[in-house]
Image (tube, grey):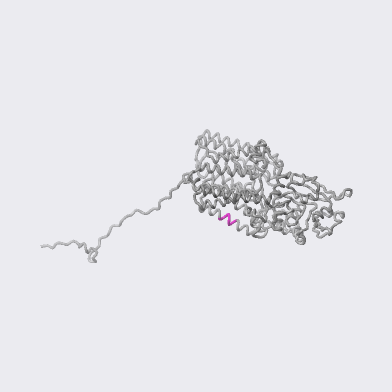
Amino acid sequence: MSKKRKGPNPASTTSPATKSQPVPPIHTPPVTTPKPIVVAEEDRPFELIRFDKRVKWFLGICIGLFILLTLAKINYSSIGMWNTVIPDGSDAKRGIVSGKPKPIRMDEWAILAPFMLSQAHQGFPLENPAIGGEKVALVGYFPINHFISFFRPDYWGFYLFDVDHGFAWRWNFILCFGLISTMLAFMLLTRNQFWLSVLGAFWLVFSPGLAWWSFFLLTSIYSGFGMLVASAYMFFSTRTRTILIAGVLFFWCFSMFALTLYPPYQVPLGYLLLFLLIGYTWRYYNKELIFNKVWLKLGVFAVAFALMGWIFYAYYLDAKSTIDVMSNTVYPGKRSETGGTGFIANWFSEYFAGWLLNDQVFPKSWLNICELSHFITFTPVIAVSLVIYFAHTKKVDPLLAIILGFVLVLLVWIEIGFPAFLAKATLLDVSPTRRTQIPFGIANVVLAILYMSYIHTNKFKVNGSVGALLTVGVVLFMIYAAWLNLEDAQGIYKAHQLFLPTLYFMALNFLLLPVVNFQYKEIAVVGAVALFTLPNLKINPVGKGMAPITENALYQKVRELHLQEPKARWVVLGSQYITYLVTATGANQLSGVKNQPDFKTMHVLDPTAKRDSAYNRYAHAVYNTYIDPVHPDTVIIQSQFEDGYQVALDPCSPKLRKLNVRYIIFDRVPQPVEIRCMKQVAKMGNLEIYRTND
């Protein structure tokens, strides 16, 4: 009888006496990271400026450069010209790191820089007869000991540091914060297209129309664009903290913009900012966002405008007499324009000027390299393309349409002009076309950036025949632009020299047409323009400190004598350049540039105001000797230029004694009769300094 085999006891399957059966492996699918969902830019929910890592890096780099370059005393002034204009035997490269100072930038190195030093040496006074009458520094844009300095941040360095660092602060502030505000404004307007905004900011800030004018307009640009960004946040933000911060920024930027007081730029630039805000609000109008916390927004706006009203009123009370004098000057106060005088160069001269012209080579009818410089424009092609987009989509982009309309209105003002009543009603009568062409050029750049943003999110391609027609149109347009410049340049250009620039910009204009499409087309175009703009970095030299002025032997000698008798007045007989340098010492002198007429001084020289039309202006005042034995103490005053007058008088005139003139500089060896009432205190080459006998 056989024994049955028992099965394993279920309770003891893990007994060591029992062989374990292998467990088959469990196969699980590998865990994979889900692919991020890419949302097209146009499909993203509405947002203002996206402060992502790239934006923060850009802001950090700009602010870091501002700090480092300021600490290193780096500036971009042409004050190195003083090494050669009034040489003292020192190194002609003194204070120059790289590049060449530009003689044509005389209003920067010979006027503005000495004005800054004059103000700094005198403790930033409101009244400074050396630079003009009344409270000249309140109306002129200079460092001043007044609450208005809160709205002149580019001058804060003069109060915090010495003059070398203060000068560097100003230059680096306007450049770095000009780039920041422009880039952020473009981020807002292009719906956060980072590289388009960065390259567009570079294109605008370093365009010849700004670089050749020593970036003066950047003070209005960074305040104006800051005001635009703040306004958009006030309209569309829903967070209390953001609205309050935007309100403070709006108040500060609006005050900065308004108190710059240069209407030829302010008026057209103000219109551009207003139309940008209207177009942006129209394009992205959202009732829920705009009316969210509407009472808070209205309250913040009300407080901002109330504060500005108080600020402007307080400023007006202090500056009223000065504003009255300025507004009643023969030049520029009584200037009234109706437009229609055209461009100094032409609308398309920047296609070729950057390749072929410099401050020494330019058509004489274009006056000088500064006056002829403006901005690259693609407006004709953009206008045609927008018509085609409208025909295709049956929609009008309000922001693009408004800015294109504004550009065309300014073009009419420049080329045709307005009736007198319309010029006054629009305030454009205070903006001569020679000045309007700069804000006009800025508007053209802004329009181009807006258009490139538009084509990025609105891909469209015309059919073959229309594309061929548009291509031929671009070719003909560029041939016309080349021919126009060849004619206007009066022989400066040779036909073969225009071939490469024509081809270059023909390609860029072609890419803007809805004929070809490829990824990053708009970045390619604006990048090519930014690349074309690179040489403009060399327009202004790189300097360190103010040594070309402050270490000049004449400056140091006059400064020494001035500190011995700080209340004594000076006059330079002869060279206007000597008098510019004397201004920088802080000495109170009769001669030199007067930002406002100094009637207190001139009424001593001209008691009956017979010649007040000669000196009632912004002017370069040059003094010389005139002695008439038959008519002693005769003073001759005559206007030589729109912005200059000459005074001829006896150096020993009692009128000079009445004005407390004690020191006289001759730019030559004087005749005995000229120095009969004085004694020499210094001789420096051909220059002789005398002090009157008490």
Q: Magenta region, mostly helix, strand or loop?
A: helix
Does residue 495 show up? no
Q: Is residue 64 magenta?
A: yes
Q: Position of residue 529 (x, y in %)?
A: 59, 45
Query: Which of 218 and 606 lies nearest the eye of the viewer?
Result: 606
Query: Which of 454 and 222 lies nearest the eye of the viewer?
Result: 222
Query: Which of 421 and 29 lies nearest the eye of the viewer?
Result: 421
Q: Is residue 664 left or right of residue 266?
A: right
- Residue furthest to the bottom in view is 16
Q: Position of residue 536 (x, y in %)?
A: 63, 48
Q: Position of residue 666 (x, y in %)?
A: 81, 54
- Residue furthest to the left in view is 1
Looking at the rendered structure, the number of numbered marks drawn on it comes to: 0
Q: Is residue 599 magenta?
A: no
- Residue furthest to the right in view is 630
Which residue appears at 78% of the width and 49% of the height? 602
Q: Position of residue 105 (x, y in %)?
A: 70, 49
Q: Which quadrant would the N terminus be assigned to in this image?
A: bottom left
User: In the picture shown, does residue 500 fall above or below 303?
Assistant: above
Does residue 43 show up? yes
Q: Is residue 298 left or right of residue 375?
A: left
Q: Which quadrant would the C terminus be assigned to in this image?
A: bottom right
Q: Please give the range of residues in magenta.
A: 60-65
